[in-house]
Image (cartoon, rainbow, N blue to C red):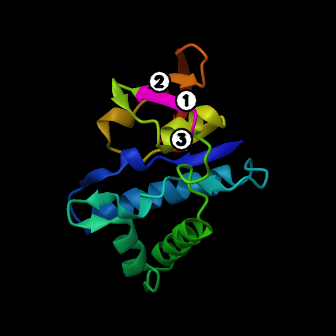
Amino acid sequence: MHFLINELSFIGQASNNYEADELMKHIFQIITEISVIQNGDPIQTHSSFASQNISSELTVSQWIFENKNSKNSEQQKIAMILLRLLSKGLFVDVQNLLNDCKCHYQNIDVTSSSLAGAVKLPGILISLQNNPDFVTENIEVEFQEGTNDLENRTVKNLTQIT
């Protein structure tokens, strides 16, 4: 099963550093829980993931570099795991995976996103909490591959482990 971190869910929803830390902790908890069912498949994301905002003044990459040497061992662990994920470079948009596809979510073209990758592979999205567009467990998209007809597809979306 493929898992993809949803870069579209990072919209600067944290209002301070504490909230940013808590949101990143939730992502880490999901990654930890799914590790038992990954079967060696890497977690993927979009190449723009590192530049997405956790808060209005803090990107994912800034958060990682501020926390990779943190005295808080949990934050350090989260930062190092995300850094490894980004350094592997398994980005859904540069693998030529989505070249012959079209994908729309809420009437917005998301063809080059992790959301489209989750439809194509197929896979499960991991979304950051508190984004009103990605709060539901199932995401409905319109997807077309090649000359096939446009069809509605459902993608599983994780914002927390229950």
**Tag 3–tag 1 contact (CB < 8 Å):** yes
Which x, y percent locates residue 103?
47, 29
Q: Quadrant of the C terminus?
A: top right
First along the sequence among labels 2 and 3: 3
Disc 2 designates what residue?
141
Most distant residue in the front direction: 147
Mark 2 Cα shell of 10 Å, populated few (<14), some (14-19), many (≥20):
many
Q: Which residues are magenta?
A: 99-104
Compared to residue 95, the image places residue 125 above or below, namely above
The Cα atoms of the two marked residues, 2 and 3, are separated by 13 Å
User: Callout 3: helix, strand or loop?
Assistant: strand
Q: Residue at position x 58%, y 32% from top?
A: 119
Q: Which residue is mark 1?
A: 155
The answer to which of 57 and 18 lies nearer the viewer is 57
Mark 3 surroundings: few (<14), some (14-19) or many (≥20) residues within 10 A: many
Q: Tag 2: residue type?
A: Val
Residue 60 visible, this orientation? yes
The kind of residue tagged 3 is Leu
Task: From the image, tell me which residue sits under label 3.
Answer: 125
Which label was assigned to residue 92? Answer: none
> What residue sits 56% from the left and 51% below the top?
30
- Please tell me whether the stretch drawn in magenta is mainly helix, strand or loop: strand
Amino acid type at image mark 1? Val
